[in-house]
Image: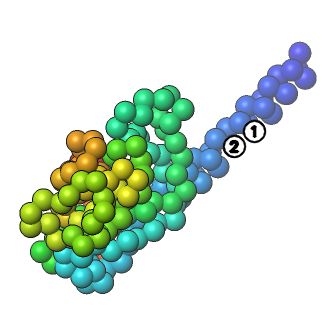
Amino acid sequence: MSTRIGIAAGVLSFVAAGLASYSVLRNDRQPDAWPIGSITEYPADTPVEVVIDHAYFDRFLPEGDATEANRHRSVAEARVWVVIRGGTEPVVYSQISPWLGCRVVAVTAADTAGFPYAPPTGFEVGFLDPCHGGLFSMDGQHLAGPGTEGLRRFRVRIDASGTLLVDLTDLQAG
């Protein structure tokens, strides 16, 4: 009997130690926000691609993708577009299109020639889903092509030193 209790106690302490170290590792890998440089490093109203090496869970699925297997897929890096609107307002967009998950690219009006959906009058710079032709404005709004959602945004803030901090756990619908 005392052998069983000893084994059970040993197993419980092993499991507790494993959970404690998992918790520490998980907390080390998932801070509240990831620094992506000073706000002064980004030109105003120009999309800049940033790759953030980390791990997080994508809680939002592309439109129409309801498979349970994709509901919480693990992602090793985040590819984002950083735009400093008007020189002072940072916006961080996910590069994953809300329409079937293709990676969006930054484009000018000239770059959209040959795609099935023409940009609206006055379009100069924005984002394009090259797989399906979806077009988005610099403020993330859906302009043309399939789907209806705008680009998804990550919550971003500026700390006291002027560093941009992106919360990759807070992806907001477009």
Give residue 136's quadrant in the image.
bottom left
Viewer-proximal residue, 46 or 51?
46
Image mark count: 2
Q: What residue sits 82% from the left and 22% below the top?
A: 5
Q: What residue sits 24% from the left and 82% below the top?
A: 43
Whole-percent x, y for residue 81 in the image: 33, 66
Viewer-proximal residue, 66 or 143?
143
Q: Is residue 168 visible?
A: no
The circle on residue 14 is: 1
Q: Is residue 164 above or below residue 167?
A: below
At label 2, the amino acid type is Ala
Viewer-proximal residue, 161 or 106?
106
> Quick one: SS at disc 2?
helix
Whole-percent x, y for residue 1 in the image: 89, 15
Viewer-proximal residue, 27 or 104?
104
At label 1, the amino acid type is Phe
Question: Neighbour class for label 1 at 10 Å: few (<14), some, many (≥20)?
Answer: few
The circle on residue 146 is: none
| Residue under numbered circle 2 | 17
Give residue 83's quadrant in the image.
bottom left
> Quick one: SS at disc 1?
helix
CB contact under 8 Å: marks 2 and 1: yes
Q: Is residue 84 above or below residue 9?
A: below
Q: What residue sits 29% from the left and 70% below the top?
A: 111
Q: What residue sits 51% from the left and 65% below the top?
A: 53
Whole-percent x, y for residue 24 in the image: 58, 52
Q: Label 2, label 1: how many angstroms apart (C-alpha)? A: 5 Å
Give residue 33's quadrant in the image.
bottom left
Whole-percent x, y for residue 74 in the image: 54, 46
